[in-house]
Image: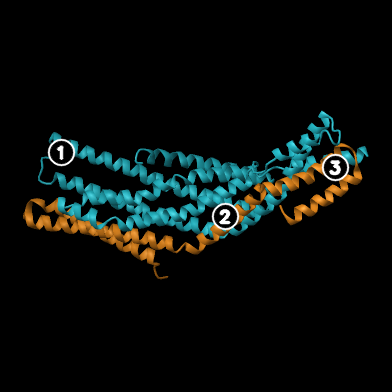
Amino acid sequence: MRRFRFALVALALTLGSCNQPQEIAAFAALADKATSEFAGVAHSVVSNCEVLMKTTREDAASVFAAETTGECGTSLKAEAALITAHKVIADYMGTLKLLASDNVLITQPADAAIDSLKGPIKLSGAQATALKGLTNVLSKALTDGYRRRELGKMIDIADEPLQAAVEAMSGVIGENIADDFDATADAIKSYYRAGLRGQDKGSIVSRMWIEQGENVLLALRAKKNATLSYRKILKSIADGHRKLKEANGNWKSAGLAQFLGETARAIQVEQKKVDQAFASGK
Amino acid sequence: MPDTVNESAERWATKYNDAANAIADFLDENFDALSNEDAAELSKSEKALRRLSKKMRDEAIVVAMEGLSEDLKAITKATERGTKAILKINDVKKGIRIVTGVIQLGTAVVTGNPVAAIQAAKGLSAELKTGV
């Protein structure tokens, strides 16, 4: 009898002490948080257009025309498309985080039910406490199996399209948006150069004008660098996810935990850069 | 390999921007020799090219993102599956039924009743197969 009880309790404790997929939850949480910075990156397409409209205006009438005919309409469409694609990835990461986290199980009903049993089956206080502990361990162990199975399936379904989406988005950021920043910088330079034509370049006014232009370009360059950093965040997310798929449900693997930890740290480093660059421009 | 629409649009955007830069350089170098009308006309062309370049590049982004729709649908499918799993785990009614089974098993273990424990374990196992 004692041996039976010991074996069952040991089994329950073994099941319950299985590592929760905490590394997955931590990785997904960070990826989820980092992706919230994407709004600034996507909006840069529109803010660059606004800069362009300002630097290429001919006169008050054309500025009015630009505003009323929606010259930045395509930029807004591009921003919306980026945000939509990104939201799909963010929603996925948020769900992955929730499913992998340890706090979805409601154990309170069990504790209350055990207390109500104290009288009818004459459980002692110590037995009730032991039973509550055992119930919680078993409940977690039981839902854990289901959770792990579903996590595995979810990761399996999402990996291929996620890799494709991340690659395409990285391409857009690295090519189109990076070039957009360069073209905006060209427009700013041209605007400030035009202001100096026919002027005494050594005058105080001209020097202030040049300095103002340099500051605008510096701020733009910081945003471009942050945008390129975001590409690294996307790559870390894709790499972490690929490792999860390769682990094939073996979430306890030490190599996986270490890889996800390093990936999470890499995301954090890049996220800080994006945070700083877009904080002032929001 | 031919360019994709995105690559082609991006290439044209770059060409328009390069042309605008060439006009700006020309204006800088020849400003004193140009009449006000000619300088204004060239400046207008430069600006029009910059706007055209921007529009082409934004179109390139839109096209690239539209090409992702199937991948995004597949990711959404995975998200929906995960959401269903979370809802299932969170289902209070189901939770209470399972917890009741766990209590029966736990009570049998704590009070040292192997027959009841095996019975409870079997019931719980069946419950879990159908639900969580």
* Label drawn at residue A206: 1
User: A137 or B55, which lies in front?
Assistant: A137
Residue extending farthest to the front is A120
In the figure, A166 relative to A259: above or below? below
Residue type of the residue flagged with mark 1: Ser
Q: Colour of chain B?
A: orange
* Label drawn at residue B79: 2
| Structural distance between the alpha carbons of marks 2 and 3 | 36 Å
Q: Position of residue A50 (x, y in %)?
A: 27, 49
| Structural distance between the alpha carbons of marks 2 and 1 | 57 Å
* Label drawn at residue A8: 3
Residue type of the residue flagged with mark 2: Thr
Image point (43%, 63%), residue name: B66
Quarter of the image containing the N terminus of chain A?
top right
Residue A73 placement: quadrant: bottom left
| Structural distance between the alpha carbons of marks 3 and 1 | 85 Å
* Secondary element at image label 1: helix
* Secondary element at image label 2: helix
Residue type of the residue flagged with mark 3: Leu
Residue extending farthest to the right is A1
Q: Respond whether the residues carrying marks 2 and 3 are from the same subunit.
A: no
Q: Check the residue under mark 3 and report the chain it is in.
A: A
